[in-house]
Amino acid sequence: MFPRSIVEQIEALKAPAQRSLERLRTTHVDRGERFELFNAGIKNGIPHFGLFPRDLLTTALMLREPRLLEQTIRFCAHTIGRRRNPSTGEEPGRVLHEWNRVERDGLLSHYNAAETSQLFLIAARLFDRLRPEEGRSVLRAQRSEIESAGDYVLSHIRDGLFLEDPSNCGATRYFAMATYWKDSHVPGRKALDYPVAYTLVQAQTVAALRSLAGLTASLDLKWQPGEIEDVARHLARSIWSCLWDDDVDYPLIALDRGRPVAGISSDALHMLAYLEPGGSPPAHLTAIKSVSVQLET
């Protein structure tokens, strides 16, 4: 239990947070489909940042709010990648990064996210569990898109790691510096040498695969749940064997072409939200707890 003082502080923050959230609410209509969503941010008092599935999915997962889950799942399925496009980063089954058109040097940011398909699968499974009857009906309507997202995730796993590589869409680089949440800056790098494995994305992929196994059983998808679970277990082990920095006793931020991107990052704490309790080596968890004290502010 939190101390009473902390609880009171949290309660005091809820009302202004709810008011701010309402200011971000937006109705989006595309090709005859209507979605009740939220813009990603406010600048100078007005909504400035548009629709980002990563933000929408993460918010829906944290709030466990069925209506937001439903609308976001539908929007992700509606805009999911269906072809390969070297300008936008689009691949079949790759969930959108950003709706707005943002361009630089002939590249666009639309599909510059490696892990939105994983978050889409995690959100779909949560919705299925929160609303078994209603949710299953909604998800059946998105069945082909869910399978496409599953194919996307599975096709990017090599040697026990989920690898991001612009060659998958026919490009040599992306609009974004990196294609996970730290998309504007990776410590110590001016450019990544693809393919790259982001440690946080590995954990998100583990959770996505476990969600896909559950969805396979629930929606009668084309895989065998046990086989998907086996891939998830292998990937989970790789986090500790391939992406651990022995020098500082802490997870790497990323690994590209065998070179570590090291640093004490909140990614290591964030990834624990996607791993099952009891499934991680106790010594590594103790090390993360000890080293992450450096992040305190």
Image: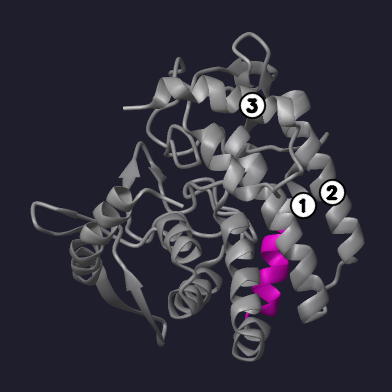
Residue drawn at point x = 62 percent, y = 22 percent? 287
Q: Mark 1 points at which residue?
A: 154
Q: What residue type is labelled 2?
A: Val
Residue 120 lies in what quarter of the image? bottom right
- Main secondary structure found in the magenta portion: helix
| Real-space CA distance between mark 1 and mark 2, rounded to the nearest whole angstrom | 9 Å
- Please state which of residues 260 and 267 is positioned toward the viewer in this rendering: 267
Q: Mark 3 points at which residue?
A: 286
Q: Which amino acid does label 3 sit on?
A: Thr
Q: Mark 2 points at which residue?
A: 231
Q: Where is residue 30 in the image (x, y as percent from the top left)?
A: 38, 79
Packing grade of label 3 (10 A; few <14, some 14-19, many >=20) is few
Residue drawn at point x = 83 percent, y = 75 percent? 217
Are dots 1 and 2 in contact, CB under 8 Å? yes
Q: Where is residue 11 in the image (x, y as percent from the top left)?
A: 27, 61
| Real-space CA distance between mark 1 and mark 3, rounded to the nearest whole angstrom | 31 Å
Q: Which mark is residue 39?
A: none
Q: In the figure, 269 relative to 75: above or below?
A: above
> Magenta span covers which residues?
142-152
Q: What residue type is labelled 1?
A: Leu
Q: Residue 130 vs residue 216: left or right? A: left
Q: Where is residue 110 in the image (x, y as percent from the top left)?
A: 43, 54
Q: Can residue 290 be seen in this view?
A: yes
Magenta stretch encompasses residue 57: no
Q: Where is residue 74 in the image (x, y as percent from the top left)?
A: 51, 77
Magenta stretch encompasses residue 144: yes
- Please state which of residues 19 and 91 is positioned toward the viewer in this rendering: 19
Tag 3 or tag 1, which sits nearer the N-term? Answer: 1
In the picture as drawn, the residue positioned furthest to the top comes out as 247
